[in-house]
Image: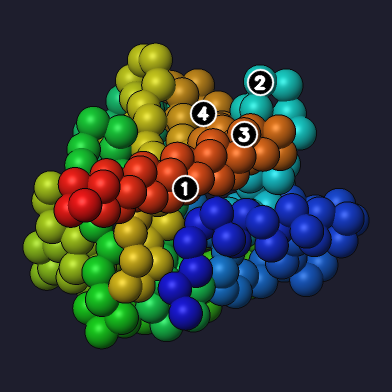
Amino acid sequence: MIKTWMQLQFGARAGALVLAGVALAGTAAKAGTVTTTSPALVLAFRVNDGVGTGGGTDLEINLGTAAQLVLEAESQPGGILTLSNSSGLAVADLRTTYGDGTTDSSWNTRSDLVWSVVGADGSHDMWVTAPSDLHTPPASSFSAQSSPAGKINTLYASVSGSSTANSSEAVSVPSSQGNSYSTEIRNGNPGTFSKDYNYFATANKTENGVPSSGSVFSELYYLPAGGTSEDVGTFTLASNGDFTFQAVAAPEPSAWASILLGGGLLVLWTRKQRHCGVAKEQAARL
């Protein structure tokens, strides 16, 4: 059965009381250790040419599930959830890994540093980001999505182990490691794949660059195999390292009532029109 994002959200809302006692990135086994499994979302950084400071290192962060992010975001002022903290993206990790501007380039001035958020649910369904100025990455058939979803599932194993000194949900991983972000998305740095996960072409690329000033934006999409891509929300990365998520607004219960009522009235109106049409035809024959 194809699960739409609306169905997943409804399930998440039904379990809100259970999730309320769970930390945002709730898959960590204990302090200092990160354990990440499907369907968590992973924020990952890499140097796409494999050279310079941090050229051989991927920074990977467990963000928790998309459903958790949406629930948390909806409870925040303005619906914006901050993910740049000691249990998310720590700017100190970006500086330590990719440059702080003292003896090398600062991480936020590098044109070769890229990032994305990705996740998989089972062997077919996926969550991927895309820069906000690009087209929506299309969902496809079960067979077509099995390969990229498999690569994302393999990635989870690398987002496990000892956390960094600055974030309880971040790990520093050698780019050359067999299940690293770099390996799964491009088969190495710079890699041999011309498409992300050997599936998403340039027009539907999943990675974004880092901002030297201001912010960059990436949309998070849910791609149910055999279904239609759905926009879940927006990730924003600022040049100072602030990282946030804002969910796409979902209709309130009162709005759903109006929608359903409107749908019911439309059905009644349509039936009435059909009956009127039949009556006119019968009258014309007499």
Single out the mark in the foreground, 2 or 1.
1
Q: Secondary structure at mark 3?
A: helix
- Earlier in the chain: of badge 2 and badge 3, it is 2
Dividing the picture into quadrants, the one containing residue 103 is: top left
Amino acid under disc 4: Gly
Dividing the picture into quadrants, the one containing residue 209 is: top left
The answer for how far apart the CA atoms under marks 3 and 4 are is 41 Å
Q: Residue at x 37, y 37 (%)?
A: 218
Q: Which residue is mark 3?
A: 258
The answer for how far apart the CA atoms under marks 2 and 1 are is 37 Å
Q: Which residue is mark 1?
A: 267
Single out the mark in the foreground, 3 or 4.
3
Single out the mark in the foreground, 2 or 3.
3
Please provide percent x and percent y for residue 266.
46, 41
Q: Which residue is mark 4?
A: 241
The answer for how far apart the CA atoms under marks 1 and 4 are is 51 Å
Amino acid under disc 3: Ser
Dividing the picture into quadrants, the one containing residue 210 is: top left
